[in-house]
């Protein structure tokens, strides 16, 4: 069993004008696909072959197998990212998530401010996450392919702050990209 490149959960142009079809064609069709292809090449004929993506990530992390881990984690991160955005995104969360955000960050604006601060502070390539821990919600950033998966941490949403995620549409304006994600794209239903 090989790892498959998942289809986007929406049409390639569904996030326009906030994320262009051109960006998604490169980001999903080139970058994400390259991680999947490199992962499949790396696991062929090894003990990783035939396992779930999450099992491969855990085993490669434990074995300090950077090549397999990086491609597996980036495959997982990108798949999670596509679901963290929606053509009907933005707005406000409801129910228990809204309550948890208000409890932890004061209100939605407090969350947005802290999330943006974390995304802007990420030096170079990485990810900004909203996660659930035993103590409640937290915003964390991870560099490169790292991800907050396991050890009692459940990712709830993520934003890719690698330049390939936004450069075609926003050039070097990461702040505008983060604002657009939080205001127009974030998928609270996910």
Image (cartoon, rainbow, N blue to C red):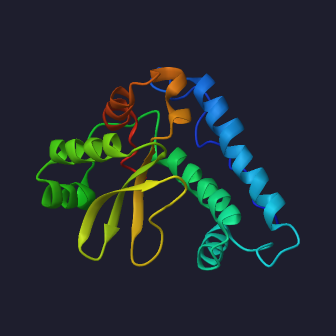
Q: Quadrant of the N terminus?
A: bottom right
Where residue 144 appears, x then y in whole percent? 52, 52
**Number of numbered tags placed on the structure image:** 0
| Residue 16 in picture, x, y percent from top left | 50, 23
- Residue 126 rendering spot, x and y as whole percentages: 47, 48
> Which quadrant of the view contains residue 31?
top right
Tell me where residue 112 appears, x and y as whole percent: 24, 42
Q: Residue furthest left?
A: 106
Q: Tell me: 87 left or right of 22.
A: left
Tell me what residue is drawn at x 57 percent, y 49 percent.
Answer: 78
Left or right: 133 in relation to 166: left
The residue sitting at 59% across, 43% down in the picture is 9
Q: Nearer the viewer, residue 128 or 81?
A: 128
Q: Is residue 169 left or right of residue 181?
A: right
Query: Closest to the observer: 56 or 63?
Result: 63
Image height check: is 95 above or below 114? below
29 w.r.t. 19: above or below: below
**Residue 156 in sight in this render:** yes
Q: Quadrant of residue 141?
A: bottom left
Please state if 176 lies on the left or on the right of 79 as rendered.
Answer: left
User: Residue 71, located in which quarter of the rendered image?
Assistant: bottom right
- Residue ID at (80%, 79%): 47
From where the camera sits, is residue 4 visible? Answer: no
- Look at 27% across and 58% down and name the residue there: 97
């Amino acid at each position: 069993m090989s790892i498959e490149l998942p289809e986007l959960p929406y049409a390639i142009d569904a996030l326009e004008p906030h994320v262009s079809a051109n960006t998604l064609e490169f980001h999903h069709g080139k970058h994400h696909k390259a991680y999947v292809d490199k992962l499949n090449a790396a696991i062929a004929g090894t003990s990783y072959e035939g396992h779930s993506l999450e099992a491969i990530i855990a085993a490669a992390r434990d074995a300090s197998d950077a090549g397999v881990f990086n491609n597996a984690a980036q495959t997982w991160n990108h798949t999670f990212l596509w679901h963290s955005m929606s053509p009907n995104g933005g707005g406000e969360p409801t129910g228990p998530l809204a309550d948890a955000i208000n409890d932890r960050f004061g209100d939605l604006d407090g969350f947005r401010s802290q999330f943006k601060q974390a995304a802007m502070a990420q030096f170079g390539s990485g990810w900004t996450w909203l996660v659930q821990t035993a103590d409640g919600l937290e915003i964390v950033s991870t560099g490169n392919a790292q991800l907050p998966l396991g050890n009692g941490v459940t990712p709830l949403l993520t934003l890719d702050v690698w330049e390939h995620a936004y450069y075609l549409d926003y050039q070097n304006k990461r702040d505008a990209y983060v604002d657009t994600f939080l205001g127009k794209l974030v998928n609270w239903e996910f």
